[in-house]
Image (cartoon, rainbow, N blue to C red):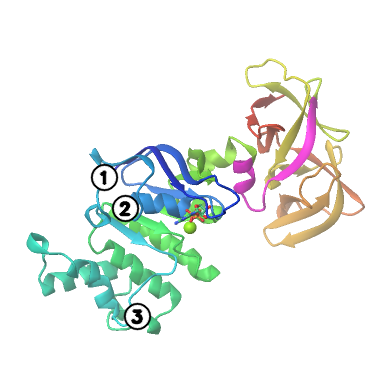
Amino acid sequence: MKITLKNLTKKFPSRNKKVREDVIAVNDFNFEIPDGKLIGLLGPSGCGKSTALNLLCGLQKPTSGQILFGEDDVTDLPAENRGVGMVFQNYALYPHLTVKKNIMFPLENLRGKDKLSKEVMEAKALEAAKLVQIDELMDRKPSELSGGQQQRVAIARALVKMPRVLLLDEPLSNLDARLRLQTREEIRRIQKETGITTIFVTHDQEEAMSISDIIVVMETGRIQQIGKPQEVYDNPVNLFVAKFLGTPPINVFSGRIENGSLFIGTDKILNVKSADGTSLADQPVTIGIRPEGFVLSDDGALTLNLTEVEVMGRDITVVSTHPESQNVEIRSIISSENHVEITGDTVKFAIKPHKVHIFSVETGQRIEFTAE
Ligand code: ADP
Ligand code: MG
């Protein structure tokens, strides 16, 4: 089901007596979530992700704005009538109930004409358990399960009523690295199998990029950018988004445009024009270069001070510094097939133009350019 957010805003009164200003946890959200997609809601801790989910599921009331499920306005509908399944970071299972009882719990609450027989409830619980592959564990208690298994129970419980919308709030944070990888693939598989419109909240950009159809990048209550993961990675609207996506992170330099050329210190990196072919004004700029944007070259334009070379099987990471770098160290990744001895105090790189972004120093907005 399609979800539409219109001017959705949530303010909390300030807890700090000295600062009277409200906290705007969700600030004027406007977007449409297409039916049947997996949306990754992504941003640093405290940016308002959980608040946005709580508004969607009805645990909190917005200060203003509207939420539509399909064509229905659900803004004032109580949580239990929205048809939403929710999964939290800490699983929130009932410790005294078996896996089966935990999964059946949302069905036990159905009353009147929706009331189900025990047989139907058990069949539905088993179906949900099979979907997340824990049907062998139905008689165990949560304390007898691993973290990954507990989270699967929580997902099964959220799915048992076949919700119209599935909301997951940092569901993998309490799992170790290997289980995190495995469980995120599982979530993707289940989402595709059921076709349920799903919103997956995380502060981990790699997690969001790897499983989402669309990512929504947030900072301090505001949406920064919405798009397919690769599109957002390739075309960040501002420095915040460019820095937030990518591991290792984008390398950021203080630079300038001068006479149609892009400079880092005394090194002339590229000749640049504005996207429409006119010349770009001379100005100081912030320059971002992705780690994969460097090509080892004896006559490369950018000279960096070599710190060390890390050989990591498939890739080689060249670690270096530069006086104009805003990162403590610059990381350049090159394929180990291009293996060459890298020695000496400095290393020279040519730069791939499409891996370079230029940002306004004042606003952080990206300045579009074409390279010559
Ligand atoms: P995230 O999930 O992205 O870490 P949250 O949605 O939990 O962020 O919080 C967003 C902001 O709203 C934070 O500044 C947080 O302190 C504030 N906040 C969240 N819930 C409340 C609340 N119940 N009362 C007051 N402030 C809150
Ligand atoms: Mg949160």
Mark 1 residue's CB less than 8 Å from ligand 1? no
What's the mark number on residue 95?
3
How many callouts does the rendering have? 3
**Rendering quarter of residue 90:** bottom left
Element type at mark 1: loop
Measure the alpha-carbon separation of dots 1 and 2: 9 Å
Mark closest to the chain's N terminus, 3 or 2? 2
Residue 176 in magenta stretch? no
Q: Which residues are magenta?
A: 240-257
Residue 366: tell me if it is visible: yes
Is 162 rendered above or below residue 289?
below
Q: Is residue 211 visible?
A: no
Q: Quadrant of the C terminus?
A: top right
Q: Where's residue 115, x and y in %?
A: 11, 65
Q: Is residue 275 left or right of residue 309?
A: left
- Look at mark 1 in the image and give the residue it sits on: 74
